């Protein structure tokens, strides 16, 4: 638990350091921050899961991406409305950060179950997570095939126009 | 003048020609029957920074053909876009109006291009019987492509929200889906421009060539991909290699470290310049070069990490300044001159009309730059409006500001405090004068100017 909290605190500290440091230092710090953002969730989850329930461990695992999302939405809210800010949480980048956390956690939970129960059990939350992000990944691949990330972004903006209207 | 202060025959003929053309284009007036107006090729690039070409003193980018336009023509050293964003800026070029008037507010979801908009191309067609072509990036919000009145030949693309793609870009040619004949889009657009010129060489023509270059994802021609692979890049103060990945800047399209992005960007500039060279060569081969006004500019600039931004929408000089040059034998009396008068994107339409001898409608806010083209002593504008309308999910808020020859004062919507910069003594805009003694002294006047600009008042000399 303490180790998981330490990873969370370290990641936030690296984010602060990145924004405050001189450029040459920031270029090194960012790798630590990126590692915290992308690997911190799965490491925190696994550390917490050894001594806690899946639900509690999930809270530790999602603390870092939740921090990231809250700070991003705080930034966006300076320009956009509350509904638009909430829609930002569905952006390709937001979903990417979330999937980088949730997919490994779901796989880790399935492995924990295998070890503790002696059988493969894909049902429940991990199965739902894997299902949802598999659909998103396949959808992104289909949309982006040949065009790359731009097309995914344009579809996201098209959805924005539908929801929030175009003058 | 040559070295020993005598005019060469070419210079005398140039002066006489300038007198003849200038005399026939003395001011806004209807095109005269029987007098053929000059041909025009207007080249509009995308996101080309004002300092990213050879003649601007860039340390490594090679742009021999833009340099030639500057050397043989005129450079507007203080050229700007009134909204640093593709669609609003492009609408301003076409209509001669500010964004708050043509109402194309941003690229995606606010405001649309309305078919009722009157472009200067329509006026050139109806009043001076130009053969007109719009070739390239249209990129306006709204459903589908417009009905462009006064355009004989309309070649564009709609994929990727109108941004197109650098290779194998499917085109829409006069309403019909058409495959590109060559792979590289800048080359394809140049080929089609040359073909139009060839077809209409015996009548006055206007080609509006709207390049995708140098918009992300920067893609030079295949043989120029590694042109600047070893170029040393010095980032602006405060920026690091990964600025484009953090704090919401990722939407700016920098999908790699800034240094690599800049190298690709500059190589794409050189690739585009090569196509400009081919177009100039084609005009020369057809004996049209000295009867054709060639204009080059861009829709807006781009921040390379200045103020920790890697996009365009902000009111910083790197985003609002434009490269702007014009080669016009007979109009430009002293080739190689720099015009210091402030020139705006909304001035292009009135200028093109004035060159053609067509009356400039009062609905256009821009002014003709023809007096400034002829003389460095011509009065220029003293203030103009710069504006942006927020666009999801980009960081830049809505704002309106006034740019004079010395100051840029900007008022923002939302939680952002106003900014005031002395752009002469602080061109990098590192020091906000709000709250300082100088700021308190000049701010009231700038606020009054801004109020009047928002009401539509003009300060064009």
Image: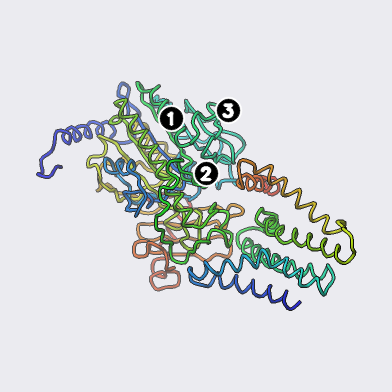
Residue at left offset 43%, top offset 33%: B190
Which disc, if any, is residue B191?
A: 1
What crowding class fits label 1: few (fewer than 14 Cα within 10 Å), some (14-19), or many (20 or more)? some
Does residue B107 appear anywhere in the picture?
yes
- Looking at this view, is B147 or B260 the one in front? B260
Q: Are marks 1 and 3 in contact (CB under 8 Å)?
A: no
SS assignment at label 2: helix
Horizontal and vertical percent position of residue B20: 22, 31
- Looking at this view, is B444 or B227 the one in front? B227
State the CA–CA distance, disc 1 to disc 3: 17 Å
Residue at numbered disc 2: B87
Residue at left offset 31%, top offset 44%: B67
Residue at left offset 38%, top offset 70%: B438
State the CA–CA distance, disc 2 to disc 1: 25 Å
SS assignment at label 3: strand
Measured along the vertical axis of the image, is residue B114 above or below residue A100? above
Residue at numbered disc 3: B177
- Looking at this view, is B46 or B115 the one in front? B46
Q: Earlier in the sequence, mark 1 or mark 3?
A: 3
The subunit carrying tag 1 is B
* Camera-side mark, 2 or 1: 1
B285 on left or right of A30: left
């Amino acid at each position: 638990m303490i180790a998981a909290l330490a990873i969370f605190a370290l990641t936030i500290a690296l984010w602060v350091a990145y924004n405050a440091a001189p450029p040459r230092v920031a270029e090194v710090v960012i790798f630590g921050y990126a590692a915290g953002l992308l690997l911190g969730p799965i490491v925190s989850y696994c550390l917490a899961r050894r001594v806690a329930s899946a639900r509690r461990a999930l809270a530790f695992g999602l603390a870092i991406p939740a921090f990231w999302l809250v700070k991003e939405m705080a930034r966006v809210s300076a320009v956009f409305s509350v509904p638009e800010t909430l829609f930002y949480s569905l952006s390709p980048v937001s979903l990417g950060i979330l999937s980088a956390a949730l997919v490994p956690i779901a796989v880790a939970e399935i492995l924990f179950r295998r070890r503790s129960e002696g059988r493969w059990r894909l049902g429940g939350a991990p199965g739902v997570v894997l299902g949802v992000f598999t659909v998103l990944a396949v959808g992104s691949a289909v949309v982006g095939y040949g065009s790359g990330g731009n097309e995914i972004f344009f579809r996201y903006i098209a959805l924005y126009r539908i929801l929030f209207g175009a003058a | 003048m040559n070295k020993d202060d005598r005019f060469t025959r070419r210079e005398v003929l140039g002066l006489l020609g300038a007198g003849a053309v200038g005399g026939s284009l003395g001011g806004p007036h209807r095109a005269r029957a029987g007098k053929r107006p000059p041909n025009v090729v207007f080249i509009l690039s995308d996101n080309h920074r004002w300092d990213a070409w050879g003649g601007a003193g860039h340390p490594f980018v090679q742009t021999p053909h833009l340099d030639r336009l500057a050397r043989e023509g005129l450079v507007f050293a203080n050229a700007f876009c009134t909204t640093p964003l593709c669609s609003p800026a492009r609408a301003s070029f076409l209509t001669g109006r500010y964004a708050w008037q043509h109402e194309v507010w941003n690229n995606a979801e606010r405001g649309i291009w309305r078919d009722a908009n009157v472009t200067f191309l329509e006026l050139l067609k109806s009043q001076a019987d130009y053969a007109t072509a719009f070739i390239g990036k249209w990129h306006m919000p709204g459903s589908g492509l417009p009905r462009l009145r006064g355009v004989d030949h309309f070649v564009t693309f709609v994929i990727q929200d109108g941004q197109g793609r650098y290779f194998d870009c499917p085109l829409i040619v006069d309403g019909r889906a058409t495959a590109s004949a060559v792979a590289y889009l800048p080359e394809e657009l140049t080929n089609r421009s040359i073909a139009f010129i060839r077809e209409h060489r015996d009548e006055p023509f206007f080609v509006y060539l709207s390049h995708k270059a140098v918009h992300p994802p920067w893609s030079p021609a295949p043989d120029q991909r590694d042109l600047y692979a070893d170029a040393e890049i010095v980032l602006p103060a405060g920026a690091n290699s990964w600025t484009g990945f953090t704090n919401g800047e990722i939407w700016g399209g920098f999908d790699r470290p800034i240094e690599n992005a800049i190298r690709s960007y500059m190589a794409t500039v050189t690739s585009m310049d090569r196509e400009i060279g081919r177009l100039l060569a084609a005009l020369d081969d057809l004996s049209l070069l000295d009867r054709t006004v060639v204009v080059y500019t861009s829709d807006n600039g781009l921040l390379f990490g200045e103020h920790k931004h890697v996009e365009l929408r902000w009111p910083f000089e790197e985003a609002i300044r434009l490269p702007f040059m014009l080669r016009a034998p007979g109009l430009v009396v002293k080739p190689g001159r720099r015009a210091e008068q402030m020139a705006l994107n909304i001035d292009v339409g009135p200028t093109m009309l004035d060159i053609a001898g067509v009356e400039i409608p009062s609905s256009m806010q821009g002014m003709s730059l023809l007096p400034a083209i002829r003389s460095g002593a011509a009065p220029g504008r003293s203030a103009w409006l710069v504006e942006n309308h927020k666009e999801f999910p980009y960081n830049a808020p809505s704002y309106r500001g006034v740019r004079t020859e010395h100051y840029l004062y900007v008022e923002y919507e939302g939680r952002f405090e106003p900014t005031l910069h002395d752009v002469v003594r602080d061109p990098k805009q590192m020091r906000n004068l709000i709250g300082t003694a100088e700021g308190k002294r000049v701010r009231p006047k700038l606020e009054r100017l801004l109020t009047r600009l928002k009401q539509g008042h003009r300060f064009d000399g």
